[in-house]
Amino acid sequence: MTDTSAMNDRGAARTAPDDLVDVAVVGGGAAGLTLALQLLGQRPGTRIVVLERQGHPVPEATHKVGESTVEIAGYYLREVLGLGHHLQSQQLNKYGLRMFFSKDGNDDITRRVELGHSVRPPGAVGTYQLDRGRLENALGHELLARGVRFLPGTKVESVDLQPDAEHHRLHVRTDDGATRQIHAKWVVDATGRASLLKRRLGLAKKVGHRANAVWFRVGCPIDVDQWSDDPDWHARIEEGRRELSTNHLMGPGYWVWLIRLASGSTSVGIVTDPDLHGFEQLNRFERALEWLDRHEPQCAGIVRRHRDKLQDFRVMKDYAYSCEQVFSADRWCLAGEAGVFLDPLYSPGLDLIAISNSLITDLVTHALDGDDTGERAAIHNQVFLLIAEGWLSIYEKQYALMGNARVMLTKVIWDTAVYWAVPGLLYFHDVLRHLGDRPDMVVGLARFSTASQEVQRFFREWSAVDDEPRDQAPFVRFYDFDFMSRLHLGMTAGLADADLATQFEANIRFIERLSGQLVATVLEEFEAEPWNPAKREQARRWRADEALMSLVEVHLREQESTPLGDQWIRLRPADEAVGTGESR
Ligand SMILES: Cc1cc2nc3c(=O)[nH]c(=O)nc-3n(C[C@H](O)[C@H](O)[C@H](O)COP(=O)(O)OP(=O)(O)OC[C@H]3O[C@@H](n4cnc5c(N)ncnc54)[C@H](O)[C@@H]3O)c2cc1C
């Protein structure tokens, strides 16, 4: 745009050219900074300003929460934004998700059932543990180096949305108290929980999921591998170090994270269902420590040993929320936590940023190039909310399951398989922004969403009547099951369009089949115990459930032609190392 068009924008005629931009990004956190980088990469020359109320540089270690990434976010940062060098040299390569389930008072980690990798996942789908301060500082430098106006210490006080004019108007105040206006064709709200535009437009939407979190950083490494010198326990890991996993200590209604950071600190967080662990038991550091003493004594002992190195302590009550709308043809968008945040389990926060930023980039660049974007905005909005809210059933009323090692393990395998098979495949193949042209895939997504709701309900019902301790595999590896490595590597297959459609359909079918196998296997077990009234009654209800039975039919039909082992559900001690070798 030239200064001439500025003259057409009422009130903008006296604006200095610097304060007239194509895109104003409000908030320079992970979402805003990465979006600016992506926009510029996609459409060089776009005039972007990023307005961040905090000064820079920000502190390392304690700056923000959200330190673990999974595959979509890893791919976004490395491949889409080209941050590979920063990730390799300034952050830590993550050694996958690892969980330890509660056993015998949780004072000996070797006795706990463990889920995790034994060998490194393939580099092509690498993931990272992020020091968020380090990341934001690096992104700020990168933006300035590429000529983006990144203005830390600048608070946006209000936004006048003017869809009928050429520019919206932002009122900003800098740290020295000076005020001015910025005029922008597009405004992106990336203010995180401050949710500037969401509040202003009344778009906040409640969700049924309730959970709380507290977290702190200690200024030293906490290395889970040093929690025992048992040689057998150490021998489980063939390659890599547990301390580089996103380690989770799991118990009824809670999980505790331990995440190493490249700056030398360790992030520790406790996430709880308020019905099982009241917030007041955790909302001060001393209380959180006492809570750890009761539920996670081995971890508590180590934190106590390092308490002189405590760097911060933060709390967040009732953190989950959604949004009625995130993108608009009236030239505004909500990015990152300014829109939706559901739950930190499985680290989807930066994934949602990757997905929403990619859709915003597509929308805004088309609009700036003069395309009519009314329909595009509406479709992108639906796609994003379908995916984001689709994640909700994974969490809603599911925290009680975390104390049931077998059900939760099966759920984690199912949730992970689904993540790789559906959003992972679509994101890695850059299809999400074209879904409006792919009705076949939208139908597939809807089918998947239905199966997903059913299966999450099934997990809940299963756990409610099957919570007796049992013998089971002490160490379950993600790649013990051939389908897991196939789905994981499938994300990076680089398929051409027609092959992708076929693969997506095959993945949806496979997820339905896995769901059916799950139901059939647990049903068989319940029906083998007719003397147990709770199991008998639950089995009767499942048999009468048409949705579940149609999934079972899919499984039974396919089992004849392509048998699939059920070890991922039975998880018996003999099932340890159950893989057939495809992945290892
Ligand atoms: C307990 C917990 C654990 C989590 N763990 C993970 C995890 O392991 N992995 C993961 O991927 N995600 C995780 N998340 C989510 C992750 O933290 C968020 O997805 C991410 O931080 C959101 O980034 P953002 O840029 O949207 O918001 P923020 O990082 O909050 O950035 C918003 C920015 O806007 C600025 N701002 C606000 N108002 C204004 C204004 N008026 N003017 C100018 N600037 C303004 C703020 O200063 C801030 O810098 C977790 C979340 C929680 C609650």
Image (spheres, rainbow, N blue to C red):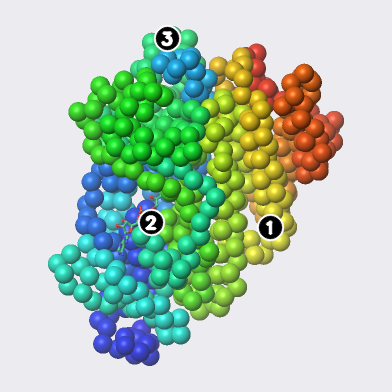
- The residue where tag 2 is placed is 193
Left or right, residue 139 beside residue 232: left
Q: Residues within 10 Å of mark 3 (few under 14, many from 20)?
A: few
Q: Nearer the viewer, residue 544 or 386?
A: 544
Residue most toward the left? Answer: 176
> Which residue is drawn at the image coordinates 46% and 40% (left, top)?
274
- The residue where tag 3 is placed is 230
> Which residue is drawn at the image coordinates 78% and 36% (left, top)?
541
**Are the two marked residues, 3 and 2, in contact with CB atoms closer than 8 angstroms?**
no
Mark with earlier residue (3, 1): 3
Determine if the C-beta at disc 2 is less than 8 A from ligand 1.
Answer: yes
Mark nearer the viewer, 2 or 1: 2
Residue 459: % across, % down: 65, 35
- The residue where tag 1 is placed is 442
Residue 88 seen in render: no
Q: Nearer the viewer, residue 460 or 30?
A: 460
Query: Under tag 1, what secondary structure?
Result: helix
Mark with earlier residue (3, 2): 2
Query: Under tag 2, what secondary structure?
Result: helix
- Which numbered disc covers residue 44? none
Q: CA distance from mark 3 to mark 1?
A: 50 Å
> Which residue is drawn at the image coordinates 27% and 83% (left, top)?
15
Q: Compared to 526, does 189 lie above or below?
A: below
Residue 180: % across, % down: 23, 76
Q: Residues within 10 Å of mark 1 (few under 14, many from 20)?
A: some
Q: CA distance from mark 2 to mark 1?
A: 30 Å
Residue 179 seen in render: yes
Give the amino acid type for the residue marked by disc 3 in the picture: Asp
Q: Nearer the viewer, residue 558 or 522?
A: 522
